[in-house]
Amino acid sequence: MERTKGLTNFHTHCDLDDGSGPMEEYVQSALSKGFSALGFSCHAPGALHDDWHMKKEDFPYYLEEIDRLRSLYRDRIELYIGLELDFIEDTEELSGAEYRDQVDYTIGSVHVMKHAKSEKYLSIDGPVDEFEMLLHDNFNGEMQRFAEHYFSLVERMMQLHAFDILGHCDLIKKRNGDHTYFDEQAPWYTRLGSHMLKVAKRNKVRIEVNTGGIARGAINEPYPSPRLMHECAELDIPLVLSSDAHQSSHIDFFFAQADDLLVQAGYRNLDVLQHGIWQSTSIV
């Protein structure tokens, strides 16, 4: 299904974190594709000090540059300032939450776990060797235990913290694109995803349909999976469509196909940030 109006994306990175290219390049791409709104969501500065989070000293520029772009393109597109915040398992903090009152919206995500041997935070969705170190050193190679812990962190984050969008809710599958590690149809795995969605419903959480794993060639379906989209529809959980773009050409990656999957799941509307307010907007 092709939508030529009302395209939006609120999960966008740039060269201030692990994305590529300046923010204005993303705005120009959005304009060329007929977007009505675009939100930036760099990985927030905070407890994690690495090469994929924004540096604390760059945050003032982040705000200033988006304000400049808002002024420059105010008659053509709505621009929003967001941040992607990371849940830290041992402290249960939402890293970067101290910046929340300076932005328009936030994404809550689980990207990392603490590695038992090194006590360093390793990424679930980053290099395969980090994924395997967590799997073998933290969980003795037992993928079910790894997935159980991942989903427990997502659930704990939703129970403890407020944010506007739950990021890539089944990210644990990113390194399982060729089904090397587990069967995504196994009853134990489907049960974990279903339980996570029930927790999202109880906590009134909005979930993103994120196409970034497809854009980066890791998987061939969005987060959440089509099966979980159907369960979201049954639970009446609001969804927002995101590309998790790390380059400007990807801001609408797989959107037409994702719209089809959403309609098949039973959705006719998605949430968008419009005129500064989250609103339900038709996709059909």
Image (cartoon, rainbow, N blue to C red):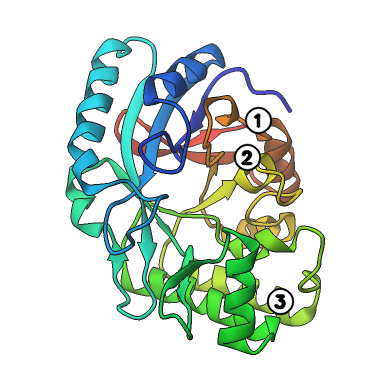
Q: Which of pointers 3 and 1 indicates the residue nearer the eye? A: 3
Q: In front here: 58 or 153?
A: 58
In the picture, measured across the screen, residue 67 lies left or right of residue 203, that is left
Task: Write the residue at 76% across / 58% down.
Answer: 177
Q: Earlier in the sequence, mark 3 or mark 2?
A: 3
Label 2: how many Cα within 10 Å (few below 14, some 14–19, many 20+): some
> What residue is disc 1 on?
284
Circle 3 — which element? helix
| Observer-nearest of 244 and 193 | 244
The kind of secondary structure element at disc 2 is: loop
Label 1 crowd (10 A; few <14 / some 14-19 / many >=20): few
Q: Vertical placement of 201 versus 84: above or below? A: below
In primary-sequence order, the first of circles 3 and 1 is 3
Residue 277, by quadrant, is: top left
Instruction: Give the x, y percent position of residue 38.
Output: 42, 28
Please state which amino acid type lies under the numbered disc 1.
Val
Q: Position of residue 171 (x, y in %)?
A: 59, 61
Quadrant showing the N terminus: top right
Q: Could you tell me if the residues under marks 1 and 2 are in contact, i.e. CB atoms within 8 Å?
A: yes
Direction from residue 151 to residue 259 in the image, left or right: right
Using the rendered image of the protein, determine whether residue 170 is visible from the camera's viewpoint. Answer: no
Neighbourhood count class around disc 3 (C-alpha, 10 Å): few under 14, some 14–19, many 20 upward: some
Locate residue 129 relative to residue 18 in the image: left or right: right
* Residue at horizontal 58 percent and vertical 60 percent from the top: 125
Q: Which residue is mark 3?
A: 189
Q: Which residue of the protein is positioned furthest toward the bottom in this rendering? A: 140
